[in-house]
Image (cartoon, helix red, strand yellow):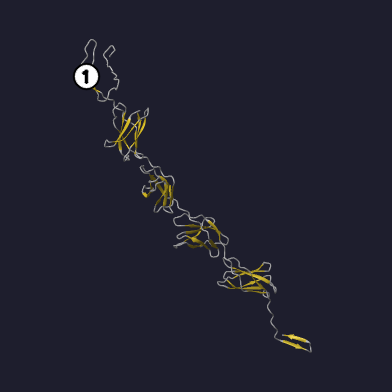
Amino acid sequence: TNNGGSTADVTVNIGGAGLTVGQVIDATITEPNKLESTKTPATAAADQSAAPVDVVANSTIDTVVVGDVPAGATVNIYNGSGTVIGTATNSGGSTADVTVNIGGAGLTVGQVIDATITEPNKLESTKTPATAVADQSAAPVDVVANSTTDTVVVGDVPAGATVKVYDTLGNVIGTVTNNSVSTEDVTVTITGLTENQVIDVTITEVDKLESDKASFTALADQSAPPVTVVANATTDTIVVDNVPAGATVNVYGKLGNILGTATNNGAVTDSVTVTIGSNDLVHTQAIDVTITEVSKLESVKVEFVALADQSAAPTDVTANATTDTVVVGDVPAGATVTIYDDNGTEIGTATNNGGSTGDVTVTIPGGLTDGQVVDATITEVDKLESPTKDATATSDVSTAPTDVTANATTDTVVVG
């Protein structure tokens, strides 16, 4: 009843089972002191639910999350053909997010779906479209690019995920998939990686987007250092054993300057001889030697000491106390002869300045005495002094007389 003082709208609450959508009712008005009016029919209609606003469709986990769904309301998800592909109800007592799992073939990246909300006693809302997106794969963290072996090893790649390797121009230069059933390291073979080459690496997991690119730098293995090295100051050569095929030997002075270099051009591991040219080696000179293998970094420097050969000892030594000379036979060209007394004191020296092997005569300024023992050595060019060879000085024998007259009368002998 309108209990007001003027014409107004009147709301009638329907008890019991209430009204249902489409239910036909009749309404009458009975004014004071008047008969009831004729019936006016009306059909019951419901309010429309509010359309969802926050809809996230994820093709990686095949779910659609609808935000702020009223308590008791139902969410419907439709595909592009208008078919319901998933539904879920907020069974809680307050507004909340609702996750709808999409069964069957699930969702695909870029697929457009429609979401509606149907609140209790309300009509289904209008459809809100959303486009399914996939999660992004996690970028690789553990990557070793090796220019020696032309490989890129990516650690902890999920099962089924694909690794791609790009150059700095964005070209794919290698790819491989982890076909196992567990997370594993994956090796990508890249032909022609170079030392310090920058590469980009991604991982694309199953049902996920490709990860961001992660940059890494290719490094080469370091060559093994030399172990057996003979540096000869006499021949100005350094012989390095066990040099791999194709590897290069460098010889450095202690100031870091390269004294010589040589490469093993054979097909197998072998010894390599480095000849030191104008930078002649000297006895006890310290040098540094390295090996650089093909597609590897130069090894660490290893120090070695150059040693000279020892001269051969003299074999033919004649000491003459009469002439105060020592004659040494077969002395090489340029070699020096040194004579020592029995105390080891040098008493004379001479050099073969000729162009060929010959005898060398050493004059002893202090003289020699008959029976005196002397030691002789030879020191050849670029060699160490030889061991000593001893000799005993002897005097010349006087010439026998040829004219001798003995006189018994005068008791005299005359030697002519």
The residue that label 1 is drawn on is: 40
Left or right, 251 with reference to 44: right
User: Eyeballing the image, is 402 above or below 164?
Assistant: below
Mark 1 crowdedness (10 Å alpha carbons): few <14, some 14-19, many ≥20: few
Left or right, 79 with reference to 282: left
Q: How many marks?
A: 1
Is residue 412 or residue 19 the one in the foreground? 19
Relative image position of residue 362 (x, y in whole percent): 63, 71
User: Eyeballing the image, is 327 above or below 195?
Assistant: below
> In which quarter of the view is residue 13 placed?
top left
Left or right, 209 with reference to 268: left
User: Eyeballing the image, is 354 above or below 45?
Assistant: below
Quadrant where the N terminus sits is top left
Quadrant where the C terminus sits is bottom right
Relative image position of residue 378 (x, y in whole percent): 61, 69
Element class at badge 1 = strand
Relative image position of residue 142 (x, y in whole percent): 44, 46
Relative image position of residue 175 (x, y in whole percent): 37, 49
Left or right, 85 with reference to 360: left
The kind of residue tagged 1 is Thr
Q: Given the current orientation, which residue lies at the most extreme bottom position?
A: 409
Is residue 274 or residue 348 the one in the foreground? 274
> In which quarter of the view is residue 208 placed?
top left
User: Eyeballing the image, is 108 above or below 120?
Assistant: below
